Each structure stands twice: as structure tokens, then as C-alpha cells.
Image (cartoon, rainbow, N blue to C red):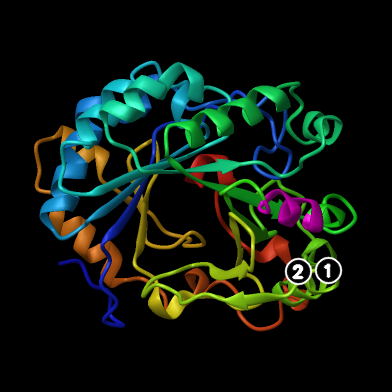
Amino acid sequence: MIKDSFDRVHNYLRISLTDNCNLRCFYCMPEEDYEFTQASKLMHAAEISSLAEIFAGAGVNKIRLTGGEPLVRKDAAQIILSLSKLPVDLSFTTNGVRIHDFIDVLLEAKIKSINISLDTLDADKFRIITRRDLFQQVRNNIDLLLEHQIKVKINVVLMKEFNDHEILDFIAWTKEVPVEVRFIEFMPFEGNRWTSNQVVSLEDILARVQTKYTFTSMEAGQNDTAKHYQIAGHAGTFAIISTMTEPFCGTCNRMRLTADGKLKNCLFSITETDLLSPLRRGEDVLPLIQECIAGKAEALGGQFSGLFKNINPDTIHNRSMITIGG
């Protein structure tokens, strides 16, 4: 069992397979000509499996693969199939572009749920956000997953005066389509030009939905990061991840392993623990894992608290989102 000093049990590991991506979303990637991590510095497939086994042996029962875009790795299928043999709930977050190339692998690995990052239902705006013209391919792949009874959660990062006017469009989508739309408050990371006046808050989102729909709250899981809601007669549901206005740190059970083998005990943690180098030297990394998590701050990496409007992003020290893993 992996615990921090606040007696929070950590049984959920997010593993970034790469910081590479086939899209160029401005809020995630600092610039178009981004220098990706050299392959020699990334965890190899066997190393990912070895570390995952260690975490599973210490009580981890849920693993999510992230990126960058995890499916751009040439050995992504090998990694997925290897980790699917562990006694964990395996899932991943993707931009959806390459799902059609991996559908047979997902079925063989018995993947039950996948998160798709999609910030707009407008093809032109998708091209602006991602700097790529692949909207229809992503929509087709969402339909493909649903056809195979794989649960789809749609991650939508909201930004004022950019895509917040689409909130009701996403809600309308859930009328006939059994997806869970997850609205995410815009968070500050290196290079994403975050400002507090861009944040669409939990309160803002619910107020917008309430102008057209009557909704009810759903019961939350023990370690849920999202607040869930349902609308009578809708095949799908919606949820809100309120990191900036109502953080959920008190029940956090998450750890993040970056593509270069560094363990972060919080999305906003300043420090990281290198697991890859000692693993390559044949050393026992479990004590390092336990020490890292034991040093976890009570909330938000100890970097900020209080009203998000008072946050100065220049004082927050962290990687860019693409190098952390979503």
C-alpha cells in the first residue's frame, strides 16, 4: 500500500508513454516547433511494464495511459497488451485520431473505457485549437468505440470567449449519444498562456446548463475528480472537473509517471523522483515511490490555494502539460 502523510492511499497510476503528439493544441503544447524528448531518455516498453508491475504489487489497481498522445508510440500496442495482463483497471486518454488503427488491440486488451480530448464540436474551431484538420476522423472514431460498447468520456477544456458558448451544444449531444462529457476548468501550466479571466468555473457551467435543462447530481465515487450530473431522457451524462474553484485534493489517490520515468506525486508538484535511472541500475525503486508519495503536499502541489483569480501563473513552477501527461 502506498500512502502519503495525510493517510491518503494512492492506488491510481497515470503513465505517460510519450510527450509526442500528432496535434498541436495551444493550451497543452507551448509552440508548434516543440522539441520532443529523445527516445533514449524515454522509458522502454519493458521498463514501463516492470514499473507497472511494481506499482500493482504495491496496491495500484487502476492505470491510465496518457501522453502527449499515447497512440503515436510505435510500440503502443505492445504496451497496452502487456499492461492488460496486470490485475488493474486499464484505460487511457487519447485525442482519438488513431483509434481506428488500434480497435482490434483495444478489444483484445478488453479496454472498457477511453477518454477522448475534444474541445469543440465545430470543425473549423477544431482546426484552430489543434492546428490540424482531423475533426471528422475523431468523430468517426468516437462512433467506432461506441459501436464496440466501449464507454467514451469526452474531455472538454473550457475557456471563456473561446468555446464556452458550446456548453449547451455538448449537452445536446448527450441527448441521443451515450457519452459522458467532462467539462474541465482551464489550469495553468508552463507555456499555455493561462490567465484567470479565461477560467469557466463550475458555477458558470451549471448556470449555463440551467438556462435550458433541468439536471440532478449523481453520486460520486470515493476518489472522483469530477462532479457528475444527469438530465432525464438523455442517453449520456455530463460532469465538471473543478480543479481551480473546488479542488478535490482531500481524496486524491493519483500518481503520475512521466514518459522519461519521473514520478510526480501531484499534477502541480515542483519536485519529481527519478525512477528510470535506478531501475536501469537494477536498484529497488519501491522505497523511492513510497518516499515520493509520503512527501506529497496537502493540496495542489503546495503551489497555490484560495481564489483562482488571485493566482499569478508566473509564480507556478511546473512542466508543460504535454511533458507531464494528462
Circle 1: element type = loop
Snapshot quadrant of residue 138: top right
Quarter of the image where the N terminus is located? bottom left
C-alpha separation, residue under disc 1 versus residue under disc 2: 12 Å
Which residues are the magenta region? 167-175
Q: Position of residue 154 (x, y in %)?
A: 59, 47
Q: Residues within 10 Å of mark 1 (few under 14, many from 20)?
A: few
Say which residue label 2 marks. 205
Snapshot quadrant of residue 42: top left
Q: Position of residue 235 (x, y in %)?
A: 59, 54
- Name the N-terminal-most of marks 1 and 2: 2
Q: Which mark is residue 262?
A: none
Q: 124 or 150: which is nearer to us? A: 150
Circle 2: element type = helix
Q: Residues within 10 Å of mark 2 (few under 14, many from 20)?
A: some
Say which residue label 1 marks. 212
Residue shown at 57%/49% (left/top)?
179
Residue shown at 10%/43% (left/top)?
283
- Inspect this view and state whether residue 44 appears: no
Q: Position of residue 28 (x, y in %)?
A: 65, 42
Q: 249 or 263: which is nearer to us? A: 249
Task: Please determine whether, in this image, residue 65 is positioned above or below residue 106.
Answer: below
Q: 160 or 325: which is nearer to us? A: 160
Of the residues shown, which amino acid type is indicated by label 1?
A: Lys
Task: Please determine whether, in this image, residue 270 is positioned above or below residue 215.
Answer: above
- Inspect this view and state whether residue 214 appears: yes
Residue shown at 79%/67% (left/top)?
196
